[in-house]
Amino acid sequence: MTIQAKKFSETQPVNEQEKDRFQLKVGDRFTLTGFVVQGSEKYKDGIAKINGRDGKTGMTVKFWTTAAAIHHQLQNMAESVGIEAGQLQTPVGVEVFEKKSKAGKMYLTFGDPT
């Protein structure tokens, strides 16, 4: 009796797209409460999944990004305020801005909310 072989893709974890998680964009302003970085074959730094609270409504907001500058800033935040199980020890108020690099490329970055 021959055992049916599985496809490679059937042996890997499924990364389901979260319909309530939106791509981070310029102008997003919220209190960042936690994040995790999910590995990715396509993006060398992975995909940052960011959770927070809307400052006006207090509702939960969920974002994702592959922006390298944001990844770096998230790591700095984790070192500065501490992180445990994906939750920051102290929430951080942020706004998303766009800046131009020395090479002329536009990129996303966090800054203090205006």
Image (cartoon, rainbow, N blue to C red):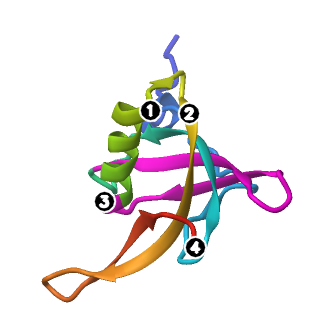
Assess whether mark 2 and mark 4 are in contact (beta carbons under 8 angstroms). no
Secondary structure type for disc 4: loop
Marks 4/3: CA–CA distance: 23 Å
Q: Earlier in the sequence, mark 1 or mark 2?
A: 1
Which residue is tagged 3? 68
Q: Is residue 44 visible?
A: yes
Which residue is tagged 2? 90
Which residue is tagged 4? 114
Identity of the residue drawn at 56% across and 33% down: 90
Q: Callout 3: few (<14), some (14-19), or many (20+) C-alpha neighbours within 10 Å?
A: some
The amino acid type found where label 4 is placed reads Thr
Please give the range of residues in magenta: 45-69
Q: Earlier in the sequence, mark 4 or mark 2?
A: 2
Of residues 91 and 42, which is closer to you in this image? 91
Marks 2/3: CA–CA distance: 23 Å
Secondary structure type for disc 1: helix
Q: Is residue 72 magenta?
A: no
Residue 13, position as x, y percentages in the image: 52, 32
Q: Callout 4: few (<14), some (14-19), or many (20+) C-alpha neighbours within 10 Å?
A: few
Assess whether mark 2 and mark 1 are in contact (beta carbons under 8 angstroms). yes
The amino acid type found where label 3 is placed reads Ala
